[in-house]
Image (spheres, grey):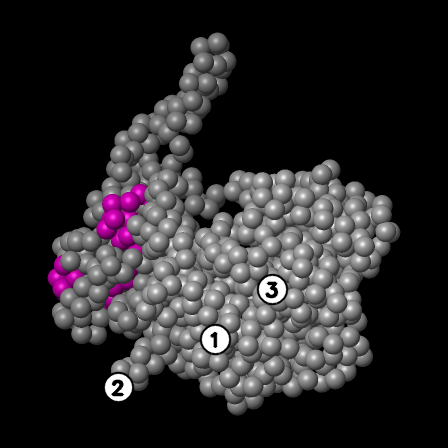
Amino acid sequence: MSAVKYIYPFEEGRSSMRDLLGGKGANLAEMTHIGLPVPPGFTISTEACTAFYAQGEKLPEGLWPAALEELARLEKKAGKELGGEKDPLLVSVRSGAKFSMPGMMDTILNLGLNDQTVQAVARDTNDERFAYDCYRRFIQMFSNVVLKVDIHNFERILEGYKEDQRVRYDHELSPNSLKSVVREYKDVVLRETGRPFPQDPKEQLEMAIIAVFSSWNNQRAIVYRRQNNIPADLGTAVNVQAMVFGNTGFDSGTGVIFTRNPATGEKGLYGEYLTNAQGEDVVAGIRTPKPVAELAKDLPEAYRRLVEVGELLERHYADMQDIEFTVEHGKLYTLQTRTGKRTAAAAVKIAADLVHEGKISKPEAVMRIEPDQLTKLLHRGIDSQAKLKVMAQGLPASPGAASGAVVFDADEAQARGDKGQRVLLVRPETTPDDIHGIIAAQGILTSRGGMTCHAAIVARHMGKPCVVGCEALRIDLNRKEVLVGGTTIREGDTISIDGATGQVIMGEVPLVDPKLSGEFREILGWCDELRKIGVWANADTPGDAQKARDFGARGIGLCRTEHMFMASERLPVVQEMILAMNEKDRRTALDKLLPMQQGDFSGILQAMQGLPVTIRLLDPPLHEFLPDGEELAVDLARLRTLAEKGEKGGEAEIARKDELLKKVRALAEFNPMMGFRGCRLGVVYPEIYEMQCRAIFQAAAQLVKEGVDARPEVMIPLVGHVKELKLLRGMVERVLDEVQKATGVTLEHVMIGTMIEVPRAALTADEIATEAEFFSFGTNDLTQMTFGFSRDDAEAKFLPVYTQKGILPANPFATLDEGGVGKLVEMAVKLGRATRPGLQVGICGEHGGDPQSIDFCHRAGLDYVSCSPFRVPIARLAAAQANIAERTKVEKDK
């Protein structure tokens, strides 16, 4: 027998053992430890799962004998025997990874039933209906999960008997009907697998353990892990637990509660239950459950105890809990507790409230919120002034609003989503197998289920709008249509849902930006107290700058001037400048652009008064402002053909387009990303950069005269050699001096720096710092040049394969590559500050809004990160978390 310990009874574990026991096993152990009524059981560790895969998906040596020994101890605790002839022990076999993955892996209930034990259960309970209901559930679940028999084979049989008896719910079937269902289920198993349904309970248990381990790598679990950045090598634990039954009559039941509302964060028990039911009935959405408050009338003593358990567990874990419970003949059992998944709005409110209740500290509250959750608070809702054609009302399972084309299956949702179409996934209920469609859809609508069904839980976690339990919908999956009242909605028709109200609305609806709560602003205020690194924003317009400031940005780290050139009224002037044959004509065109640019900069500097605004001089190659060469050649050929046919008046247009085509071809490059762009433009055509600097400084001087504290910073892009920067810095200083003399205004806060985006710039940062007062890392281009990747080609053709095969841990354009690009950043910071100790250093690529990259920037000693305005709250939170994590590590290391 192996010396490795793989099995832990609940009494041996604690909540701190999540890595080994998984979240479910650790929490079952903790609840047992604090004396809650938990049915006995044991956990097979995640290490056993890892060994299972290492040995070719076989149970590791010694595991099964150890499991039989632990089963014997469980039988002694329960006073029952698995497969016993009297009051037999039945167990559940459930998965449980370190990180919650609701519904993604497999569960088997009622294990231990066979043709003999079902009769024993019927005798002991004096309830044949209950016994055979449990047996048919077990055959269906075991056959689907372990034997891989399609579940629809069983559902058709069950629905047929309900129709014959003219009943709506499973529990209304007679014992004789359930016996017939069991016989037909076993016939299905024999037909589909070629072998009878297994009757040996111990064989059932071994097969179930293997199946749960195998479910770690089922397709839906893989998709979920990828979506939620859960490592693939963690494995799942397996929990074997004595069964208690909520389907023994109407003095029994099962349910799921949250100690606070998972959608809003309001304090108080929130959840649902069903009498005379088992757990999967609630989460699968097969029956629409009752609000948990009604349990106070149905089973008052169980409800009183449930309230006590909820308060105890929330106090113990100092967080909102998601609790599964069963009542068997009036007695309450707690089957599971875990930190409850919640909407972004609820996460913020709960964290703030727990601080005010004295249960956690401000740093703990900040660490409780996932940075990307905050983006979900920025989801749009339906315009309150809109006139809506409400078709139906369901349960508001996850807030936010969405419009899209109706689709009825997950594959179609993914196919349309991949083409960029907005879709709503409409189903009777969702299952874990629908995960890829849920990811692709704008929102989810179901006709069955409650607030704790699969669709509701997954949508809340993903921040997607969701409406469930909309019983007015009559969905026909075969015809791909849904009947609502007298209206038929077909696949491809557009509808809308409001996850905040539960409304289902005909057609597309107008959406509005959200209003942020007081708790949201309060927690962000705590983040500002707790972070070291600054948070700035990328903004190219006064509106974007104001939005960034509203979200708490303390400066503009990147203002891209080329975006201003693309406006339709300016493009002809820009093209005139590009087509100019000499400097004089080029300056004539630039003189026309100068007041336009000055107005742009004035608006942004005014919006950010008192804060720095880093303006990057023109960066992209000039050909980007000209028409496409191939389209121009085709158009020119068409005009010439018309002229040859005798059409008059096109000579001037032909001459203009011919000249334009020559210029386009002259400016064309084999590799524009590494070509004639950035500071190279300024070196060859210094008048372009002169115009931009003059516009910046004239705008700032005029604002200063008006009493506005304007603080422009000039950033020279794509510098790779210190002499490039020295030359252009001299030009910037000359223009600044000219403007100050002409206006009589001294601009006190002007800084001149560069964007570090060429590897040579990072390698020679000590030299470049002699001319730069600040560095701003342009990590998009720095990543391209360090890897030798063309971003668009890489992301379209091979990066997804690289991440799937583990060559790269993540897309390096989304999360900064610390091992390569990160080393260049660290080197540049060290070298630059060795030359200029007060050097200001920031990052303005897309990585500035990525939480993991922000953590790196904090550790690398950057002064600020700059991101899009809507990422500013995320960056403020991530920056605070980076500092808290560093302080915590330092304290632990002492």
Which residue sits furthest top?
645
| For residue 214, side relative to residue 141 (left or right) | left
Q: Nearer the viewer, residue 845 or 190?
A: 190
Q: Is residue 284 visible?
A: no
Residue 468 occupies quadrant: bottom right
Residue visible at 57% across and 57% down?
200
**Which of the marked residues, 3 or 1, is nearer the chain's N terminus?**
1
In depth, the one of 176 and 298 nearer the eye is 176
Mark 1 lies on residue = 9
Which residue corresponds to the image point at 49% horizontal and 49% vertical from the top-left?
Answer: 219
The N terminus appears in which quarter of the rendering? Answer: bottom left
Q: Amino acid at mark 3?
A: Gly
Can the viewer see residue 751?
A: yes
Query: Mark 3 against mark 1, which lies toward the viewer?
Result: 3
On the image, which quarter does residue 126 sit in? bottom right
Question: Is the residue under label 2 in contact with that under label 1 (CB below 8 Å)?
Answer: no
Q: Nearer the viewer, residue 585 or 210?
A: 210
Find residue 171 and report its horizontal and vertical position in percent. 78, 61
Q: Which residue is mark 3?
A: 83
Q: Position of residue 708 (x, y in %)?
A: 42, 72
